Image (cartoon, rainbow, N blue to C red):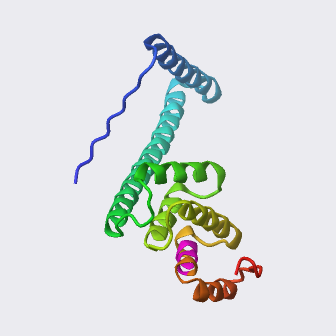
């Protein structure tokens, strides 16, 4: 399978040109420092080449990670669309609404956005959780996930079961260590 990478750089061309010139100047200065330290042009070039190789290696790893993350998110969004369709949109949410909800949690929680989407996808399978209740369930999922040290998928499964069948769900939550007041029960 072949993949294509397109990089689009936009902005003021004079700023871009200055940035490339500065990078070129920095590389030249690095080479000059290498000459003085190692005493020869060859040693400086080797050091500069090694630095460039390390930099390119780091860039390659970052790009590969970015592609992997993008593929995962694409898969999770497709799963969300399918779940909304298969449940007849029992959650009464649109993909843009769910996207905004996930984005808001990503900025506030110390949880990876892909993990948030996995948890939300699990919550969507419980057809008794809808409308504003879905928003509150997502918030509870995030809070519980962080507090209990579980991933959001596991927490969403437990929370979804509790909300779908409250009597059995309360027992399940209590076994996991969640304390509920009489009012909450």
Residue at 46 percent of width and 14 percent of height: 12
Report the quarter where the N terminus lies. bottom left
The percent coordinates of residue 24 (x first, y second) are 50, 19
Kindly identify the residue that appears in the image at 39 percent across and 49 percent down: 67
Residue at image position (39%, 61%) is 80
Q: Where residue 100 sits: x, y (%)? A: 51, 48
Residues 50 and 155: in front is: 155
In the displayed orientation, state which residue is furthest to the left: 1
Q: Is residue 85 above or below residue 169?
A: above
> Residue farthest to the top?
14
Q: Is residue 102 above or below residue 147?
A: above
Quadrant for residue 39, please give it: top right
Apparent side of residue 37 relative to residue 95 in the rendered image (left or right):
right
Q: Residue at x 54, y 28 (%)?
A: 44
The count of marks equals 0
- Front-lying residue, 181 or 16: 181
Q: Position of residue 161 (x, y in %)?
A: 53, 80
Residue 101: say if magenta.
Answer: no
Instruction: Inspect the magenta stretch and tell me whether residue 156 lies in it.
Output: yes
User: What is the span of residues highlighted in magenta in the rendered image?
Assistant: 155-161
| Residue in the foreground of this view, choosing between 83 and 29 | 83
């Amino acid at each position: 399978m072949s993949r294509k990478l397109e990089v689009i750089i936009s902005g003021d061309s004079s700023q871009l040109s200055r940035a490339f010139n500065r990078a070129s100047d920095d590389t030249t200065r690095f080479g000059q420092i290498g000459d003085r330290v190692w005493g020869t042009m060859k040693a400086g070039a080797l050091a500069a080449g090694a630095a460039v190789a390390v930099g390119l290696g780091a860039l390659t790893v970052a790009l590969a990670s970015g592609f992997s993350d993008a593929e995962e998110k694409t898969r999770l969004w497709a799963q969300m669309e399918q779940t909304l369709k298969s449940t007849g949109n029992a959650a009464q949410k649109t993909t843009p609404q769910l996207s905004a909800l996930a984005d808001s949690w990503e900025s506030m929680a110390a949880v990876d956005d892909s993990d948030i989407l996995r948890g939300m996808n699990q919550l969507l399978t419980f057809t008794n959780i809808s409308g504003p209740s879905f928003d509150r369930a997502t918030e509870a999922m995030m809070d519980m996930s962080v507090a209990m040290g579980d991933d959001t998928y596991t927490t969403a499964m437990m929370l979804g079961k509790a909300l779908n069948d409250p009597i059995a769900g309360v027992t399940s939550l209590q076994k996991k260590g969640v304390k509920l007041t009489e009012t909450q029960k």
